Image: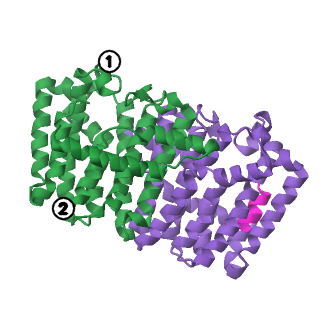
Chain colours: A green, B purple
Amino acid sequence: MTAFSETIKETAALVETALDEFLPQRDGPLGRVVDAMRWGSLDGGKRLRPFLAIAAADMFETPRERSIRVGCAVEMIHCYSLIHDDLPAMDDSDLRRGRPSVHKKFDDATAILAGDALLTQAFEILAEADTHPDGNIRCAIALELARASGKIGMVGGQMIDIYAEQKDFDLAGVTELQRLKTGALIRFSAVGGGIVGGASDDEVAALSAYAEDLGLAFQIVDDILDATADAETLGKPAGQDAEMDKATFIKLMGMDGAKSKASALVERCKSHLDRFGAAAEPLKGAADFVFERKS
Amino acid sequence: MTAFSETIKETAALVETALDEFLPQRDGPLGRVVDAMRWGSLDGGKRLRPFLAIAAADMFETPRERSIRVGCAVEMIHCYSLIHDDLPAMDDSDLRRGRPSVHKKFDDATAILAGDALLTQAFEILAEADTHPDGNIRCAIALELARASGKIGMVGGQMIDIYAEQKDFDLAGVTELQRLKTGALIRFSAVGGGIVGGASDDEVAALSAYAEDLGLAFQIVDDILDATADAETLGKPAGQDAEMDKATFIKLMGMDGAKSKASALVERCKSHLDRFGAAAEPLKGAADFVFERKS
């Protein structure tokens, strides 16, 4: 086990504890929506987005109590999007992270509401004074998150993914789809961590450039894994892109072309962080991790 | 036509223009989600919530450019909740404000995403500096809106509405359901308007007391209308509460009891505003309007 895989696991454990505390269990119908929020957000995933937020903030010696809140906010947005995407009306996925998706465990109505509540709570967390004493900083983070996840961000990307005639997409089209659907939230993670840490505009721009390259590499690796891994390793159905004739980087660049593109992006994304010296090692490690991941 | 019905129409026109500007049309799949957001939010309703926000802010001589933004944010939350509530997995309503609901006009996936995007944009608007130069004020408003609309607010109320055994509800249970499902957002409207106007804690508390009574009166009148009006007047199906054996104030208090309770609440809610003198006339007019409305 490499040192980095230990680091990201430690951060994931901190995020798990914080999410658990943000979602205290209750009785009755109010408890049902909380249970569904917990099912859709706890005990899951690599927590890459919170890791990026926390590691970016760590470079500026930010108190972890603050950066973990930014990490939890972006993870709640990520998890709500998975819950809604999995619905029968959308991607109709029964399996998520190796377990029944929220609408299979509960039902469609509860999944819709649990997603809505996670989305709402992300902004509740950012607006609270514990995130940062300066309200202008908190609003700057909330604004970045809203833009990354809204109609010209993640939601827009999902619309393109569902409605565009993807079989005709060229590389620019696939790249734009990726930038919106998954890239915007990955970019937010690093940028939000920088802002809560008090980064200068130049430093935020460097984090943004890093995360844009990283997000694209992430999606290319996702396409590679969908084409090569099995469902058990992925924790979700594999081979769906080809089956649905979706536009992917594999289809447009070939497997070898996709692999070398991802590799080049990972190297380039790390170079954007050179100005931060040794403090950037965790974020550089995340880039290698994204490239080498198996699920 | 009374003076008040002119006032609320003027405010609704301002809100309509602002919402239209917040949702510029686009081409392609990104345009589709915007079209659905527009279908679900433009050209509709009395805009009671924005009116409350704007009228509350007016008492403190707040620039309308600010209070209209708070009004648009709460209206986007209200409209997203209607879009999601109308889905087949939830209330399965084909008709809203006399027109096809969003999932009938578009489809379920688009309705889910349009709702998500409106919810997200509400917080985007509040986080932007145009809402108020002081970030702490903007965050205070966003925090109130998130709490009013989240898992222990509007979403929680919708969970109770769907999952509780309502036929066994007593008056306390129906009142709690109402307080979460519709009351929290009405309370936010007045409180958010007060905060953007720089109201003191005492003044915000008076606005909150006003809006809590008003919200309850609003729901009682809603129950009365559902039991007595026709679908054409309501712009949505009538008589649904009895058909679904829902807990209503009519069922628990009788028609005469419900009418006198609503009347008493309207009088009491106005009394909370006496400290503001003549400046409170528009908000007092809103209370009479809620009581006298026919749809």
Residue drawn at (37%, 71%) of the image: A134
Q: Position of residue A93 (x, y in %)?
A: 42, 26
Chain of the residue under label 2: A
Image depth: mark 1 or mark 2 in front: 2
Q: Is residue A71 above or below residue A84?
A: below
* Residue B118 appears anywhere in the view: no
Q: Earlier in the sequence, mark 1 or mark 2?
A: 2
**Residue A243 got which mark?**
1
* Amino acid on which disc 1 is placed: Glu
Circle 2 crowding by C-alpha within 10 Å: few under 14, some 14–19, many from 20: some
Q: Chain of mark 1?
A: A
Horizontally, residue A170 falls left or right of residue A15, namely left
Magenta stretch, main secondary structure class: helix
The answer, for residue B18, to whether it is visible in the render is yes
According to the image, label 2 marks what residue? Answer: A203
Magenta-drawn segment: B285-295
Please give left or right for residue A37 compared with residue A74 in the image. Answer: right
Q: Is residue A62 above or below residue A250?
A: below
- Residue A248, image x, y percentages: 24, 28
Question: Which residue lies at the image location 66% right of the left edge and 63% below the top edge?
Answer: B8
